[in-house]
Image (cartoon, helix red, strand yellow):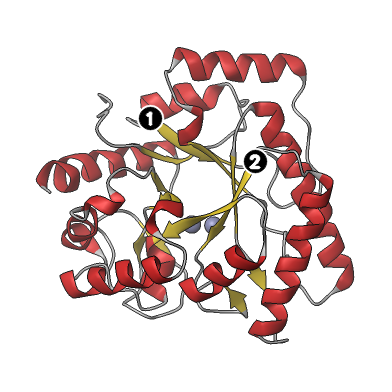
Amino acid sequence: MKVDRRFKIGAHMPVSKGFYKVPYETKEIGGNSFQIFNHSPRTWKCSWPNDKEITKFKNSMRDCQINFDNAFVHSGYLVNLASPKDDVWEKSIRLLIEEIKTCELLGLKYLNIHPGSHLGEGEEYGLKRIITALNRVFKVVENSDVIILLENVSPKGGNIGYKFEHLGYIMSEFKGKVAITYDTCHGFDAGYDITTHLGMKKLIEEIEQTVRIENIKMIHLNDSKYPLASAKDRHENIGKGYIGINGFRNFLSFEEFQNIPLILETPGSNLEHAEDIRILQTEILNKI
Ligand SMILES: [Zn+2]
Ligand SMILES: [Zn+2]
């Protein structure tokens, strides 16, 4: 599909065939931006890319004309910077440091994380634990150019970061390089209604009072399998869930969000994401 250069669009891409394949496959599905895991997300170890893999990846980025500013890494599933369990917390800090170093090797500057879950210890405890962990991480990688993106999450399981107040607090207390990802499904789960004009006005006002729009560096564009404020965290393909085509048209008609990379984390893989991008392009972006 032809890539629409007005918008930055892409999906979470598989890396199983090698990092260098990602830019080519991104083009194939009609994208010009992407997100990846930089190691197996269910393990505590990074597998360092070798020099040859790094060169191949950078060449393919150039070949496909994908800007490094529009390429993102999502941290593994195991990292929990708010964990009250000391062993998990220490391992999370170590893994995040390795993930940052892997980003550096690949020339990728944004690493998206879920702030963490306090697992019942309370939000204040969780927030403090996250800030301490981030400070520990950046003591080790203080000269790194990698920017941590805090993603808003679904309000379940002791999660920190389902509201902007949490993200804003972490941003203000942690002095390192940090910005924000807004996930539309998680936000819908938390009661941010992007399907109405009033809902968008409220969302933008809340963002401006906390993290500020200019700090949002990525949108995770996901429909939601469940209604507003369900707290289920079940992503759906674009237009097939409760946000729907009209909801996304409403969301993306606000120019504040039009210049931010829109990354799909919808069910399926490249084939389904190509279809989601086609729908996003023809039914939503062409009609706003
Ligand atoms: Zn995420
Ligand atoms: Zn997400």
Q: Amino acid at mark 2?
A: Val
Residue 265 visible, this orientation: no
Taking the spot 86% from the left edge, 62% from the top edge, the residue there is: 90
Please, which residue is most extreme toward the left here? 287
Please, which residue is most extreme toward the right here? 87
Q: CA distance from mark 2 to mark 1?
A: 21 Å
Q: Which residue is mark 1?
A: 32
Residue 79: x %, y % from top left? 72, 59
Would residue 6 be found to the left or right of residue 95 on screen? left
Quarter occupied by residue 77 = bottom right
Comparing 54 with 258, the one in front is: 258
Q: Secondary structure at mark 1?
A: loop
Taking the spot 27% from the left edge, 26% from the top edge, the residue there is: 1
Mark 2 or mark 1: which comes first in sequence?
1
Quarter occupied by residue 84 = bottom right
Quarter occupied by residue 105 = top right
Would residue 133 be found to the left or right of residue 25 on screen? right
Depicted 104 relative to depicted 260: above or below:
above
**Residues tagged 2 and 1 counted as in contact (Cβ below 8 A):** no
Callout 2: CB less than 8 Å from ligand 1: no
Taking the spot 53% from the left edge, 16% from the top edge, the residue there is: 60
Would residue 163 be found to the left or right of residue 101 on screen? left
Residue 197: x %, y % from top left? 16, 69
Q: Secondary structure at mark 2?
A: loop
Q: Which residue is mark 2?
A: 146
Residue 288 visible, this orientation: yes
Depicted 256 relative to depicted 21: above or below:
below
Report the mark closest to the observer, 2 or 1. 2
Q: Amino acid at mark 1?
A: Asn
